[in-house]
Amino acid sequence: MLRLTGLDGVPAGFGPSVVTIGKFNGIHLGHLEMIRLTREIAAEIGAQSVVLTFDRHPASLLAPEHVPEEITGMERRLELLERAGVDAAVILPFTQELASLTPHEFAAQMLVDALDARAVVVGRDFRFGSHASGTVDTLRELGAELGFEVRVVDDVAPEGGERVSSSLVRKLIESGEVSRANRLLGRMHAMRGVVVHGDARGRELGFPTANLSHESTGLIPADGVYAGWLIDSDAARYPVAISVGTNPTFPGERHRRVEAFVIDKTLDLYDHLVVVEFVERLRGMAKFDNIDELITQMTTDVQQARAVLALPAQ
């Protein structure tokens, strides 16, 4: 997959293309349906399939006090787009200049002049241009004028008729309902980051953990213990029990931590770039009266993680 930053990064003569546009925060089932249709149309007309997205949420510039938490960091997002099979991802820096473009200027400069778009795929609530003044109807009118077809993807609602959206996925993850969020994502929610040294407390208790740095990307789920998987930088995959929170048993903890205990293996993962996937929440965070109670509970957590991950009991 080509990764192109800004219009200056688009090669001269690029296209023809079929383009889908959006923030793609999380790459959920609705996004995947837009990408599927984009690829289908591109294959039919012999064009390149392109995702046009932004380097940050538009609210970071237009309403900084209301910027939602990112579900997936940009690098992970690009990995997921590549996995979805698009030919190119164009990442536009969301600047005041971009935000000031009229709908006509956006369509002419971004879609026609830069990408030679023959078709554009969007969701039904798509808005674009200065002050979000452009609607799907506006885009259709511009398509008729500038020479591209517009296809609108209906809502995707796999669970009881509830529409899949980034806001719903975010809400579920923040409340710890990762297994339900995973169904809306079509994959497991994950964090991506470097393993750093912690305070070695888990090692002292017999449960050494891989601690993700505070610079890790991906939305942190609600405090608690989860079953999941750790994918190392060499693509090796390991079952883990994951602790999220401040660990209230020990005084003085203030920063939320994400720590993964690798089941059945002792590994040196320090400085490795890893992906931690969350499968299911086992319990909330709890404070224990003594270390023995904590160790007993951690042993139970690992056993429950084994069951969730379909590992042999030990």
Image (tube, rainbow, N blue to C red):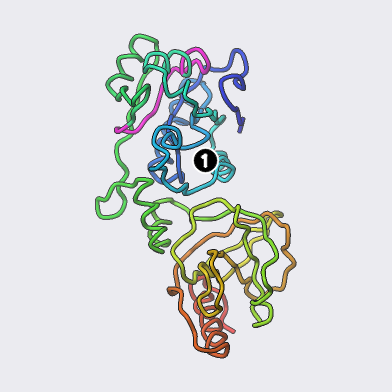
Task: Identify the residue under disc 1.
Answer: 84
Residue drawn at x 59%, y 67% as measured from the top left: 259
Determine the residue located farthest toward the top in the rendered image: 145
Does residue 143 sit above or below 284 in this rendering? above
The number of discs equals: 1
- Decide whether residue 143 is among the magenta residues: no
Residue drawn at x 43%, y 50% as measured from the top left: 185
The image quarter containing residue 150 is top left
Left or right side of 299 for 19: left
As rendered, which of 47 and 215 lies closer to the eye?
Answer: 215
Does residue 142 sit above or below 301 in this rendering? above
Q: Residues within 10 Å of mark 1 (few under 14, many from 20)?
A: some
Residue 87: x percent and y percent? Answer: 56, 30
The image quarter containing residue 274 is bottom right
Residue drawn at x 59%, y 27% as measured from the top left: 5
* Tag 1: amino acid: Ala
Q: Quadrant of the N terminus?
A: top right
- Decide whether residue 114 is among the magenta residues: yes
Residue 212: x percent and y percent? Answer: 62, 60
Determine the residue located farthest toward the front in the rendered image: 252
Q: Secondary structure at mark 1?
A: loop
| The residue stretch that appears in magenta | 111-125
